[in-house]
Image (cartoon, grey):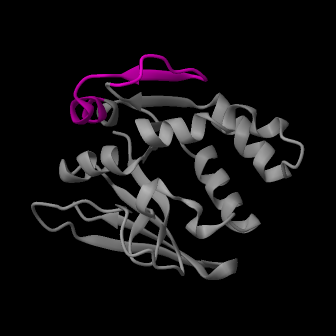
Amino acid sequence: MRKLIYGMNLTLDGYIAAPGDDIGWGGPPSDELFQFWSDQLQATDLTLYGRKLWQTMSSYWPTGDQQPNATPTEIEFARRWRDMSKVVFSSTIDKVDWNTRLVTGDAVAEISRLKAEDGGPMDIGGATLAGAAMRAGLIDEYVLATAPVLVGSGTPFFTALDSWVNLNLVETRAFPGGVVLTRYETRH
């Protein structure tokens, strides 16, 4: 059975985007934090995206390694992203590319099916998609890169739940710029 990991950058008050889907609140990540996310991507067998995050990622990373000011870490990340297997869950887009498969049906059923397969870890990204997986009890690990900024409202990292989810702290790590990474596993 595969492990499902939900990890993103978020504000101290728990938002992944400020109002208007603004993700500029954190500025560019430090080289160390960007390397962490690149290493996380390398350790991932399959990434699951909701529509909005897919559109954000696919608008830049397919050619991110060809940008004139791309750092070595960005070049590495772009190549890893382009080459890895991805699944996009959406009922409003009709085409995906770059080693990606589109799922238009029941996301929770498909994520459950993918988890039951043999294989390496899966990452899930996008608040709506991750929220559905969270409510279904499918997430095994949470990775939060919390920036020292408050935005007051926007798109929350966590969704409303019907019952408590108990977690075990696995890792805490500080990055330049005051970003604190925490990793938690769910207790089953």
Residue 112: percent from left, percent from top: 25, 35
Image quadrant for the N terminus?
top left
As drawn, the residue found furthest toward the top would be 94
What residue do we see at 41% from left, 47% from top?
Answer: 126
Q: How many marks?
A: 0
Q: Which of 120 and 26 is in front in this view?
A: 26
Q: Which of the 4 image quadrants contains residue 12?
A: bottom left
What residue do we see at 45% from left, 64% from top?
Answer: 18
The answer to whether residue 52 is visible is yes
Query: In the image, 65: left or right of 152?
Result: right
The answer to whether residue 50 is visible is no
Magenta stretch containing residue 106, yes or no?
yes
What residue do we see at 31% from left, 47% from top?
Answer: 128
Residue segment shown in magenta? 92-113
65 relative to 16, above or below: above
31 relative to 55, above or below: below
Magenta stretch containing residue 63, yes or no?
no
Q: Which of 32 and 97 is in front in this view?
A: 97
Image quadrant for the C terminus?
bottom left
As drawn, the residue found furthest toward the left would be 162
Residue 60: percent from left, percent from top: 67, 38
Q: Which of the 4 image quadrants contains residue 110?
A: top left
Residue 29: percent from left, percent from top: 68, 65
Q: Which of 178 and 41 is in front in this view?
A: 178
What residue do we see at 59% from left, 52% from top?
Answer: 40
As drawn, the residue found furthest toward the right would be 68
Residue 186: percent from left, percent from top: 29, 63
Query: In the image, 75: left or right of 17?
Result: right
